[in-house]
Image (spheres, rainbow, N blue to C red):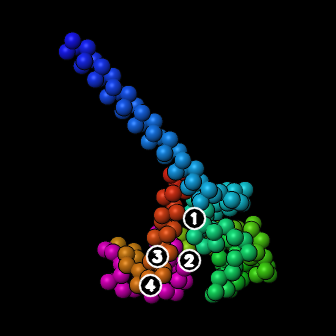
Amino acid sequence: MKHKKAIVRSIVIILILALSGLCGLAFQTVLDKVDRVNYPQEYSEYVTKYAYEYGIPEYVVYSVMKVESGFDSGAVSEAGAIGLMQMMPDTFNWLTSMRQENLDSALLYDPETNIKYGTYYLSYLYVRYGSWTEVYAAYNAGQGKIDEWLEYDSLTDQNGKLEKIPYKETANYVKKLEKANETYKRLYY
């Protein structure tokens, strides 16, 4: 009799564990579906093309669009940044002149153009700084500020990389991008 009770108890425990595992899996599946709605892969044809062309991970481009504009190609910030990747017209003009192109900054409303030059700019910043933290901070606060901050030992680590960001807005921006990166990697990569 004790042997049968032990077998029944073992079966019940196994069934409870299996059911718990299935419930956990179902819950995670629902969470992933919600996250996929909140972290979409819009404009994937352009993201794939330009991420490959400029050597930037796709999830970085998606994260910048998510954080910067929420995928609104018509977005304009109070500072005057335009489009999906919220590029400043002066930055766009500088980048187009580097590429020996003469394009009107109104093209920043065009998703392909905005993604192309936003991704190109991320690539430029990564080559310059070699650290995503510094790239994101420069994308938000500008290269001049990052260069200034890198001169202070109190803001850098032992390797001279930016460790502390003195602007709260920029520090929060970097955190948002890092969170978005992790979410995109978990969902799609």
Residue at the far front: name it.
Answer: 1
Please, what is the three-letter code of the amino acid marked with disc 4?
Answer: Tyr
Q: Is residue 132 magenta?
A: yes
Q: Residues within 10 Å of mark 3 (few under 14, many from 20)?
A: few
Quick check: 59 above or below 4?
below
State which tag comes first along the sequence, 4 or 1: 1
Within the image, what quadrant is residue 11 found in?
top left
Which is nearer the eye, 38 or 82? 38
Q: x and y percent of residue 66 in the render? A: 60, 66
**Is label 2 in contact with label 3 (beta carbons under 8 Å)?**
no
User: Which type of secondary structure does the marked residue at label 1 adopt?
Assistant: helix
Please, what is the three-letter code of the amino acid marked with disc 2?
Answer: Tyr
- Residue on which disc 3 sits: 172
Residue at 48% over, 80% down: 170
Q: Nearer the viewer, mark 2 or mark 4?
A: 4
Residue at 49% over, 86% down: 145
State which tag comes first along the sequence, 2 or 4: 2
Please, what is the three-letter code of the amino acid marked with disc 1?
Answer: Ser
State which tag comes first along the sequence, 2 or 3: 2
**Is label 1 in contact with label 3 (beta carbons under 8 Å)?**
no
Give the left or right position of residue 155, taking residue 112 as reference. left
Residue at the far left: name it.
Answer: 2
Marks 2 and 4, how far apart at CA: 13 Å
**What label does residue 139 carry, if any?**
2
Q: x and y percent of residue 43 in the render? A: 71, 60
Q: Main secondary structure of the magenta part?
A: helix
Q: Magenta segment, which residues?
A: 129-158
- Residue on which disc 1 sits: 63
- Residue on which disc 4 sits: 167
Residue 59 seen from this side: yes
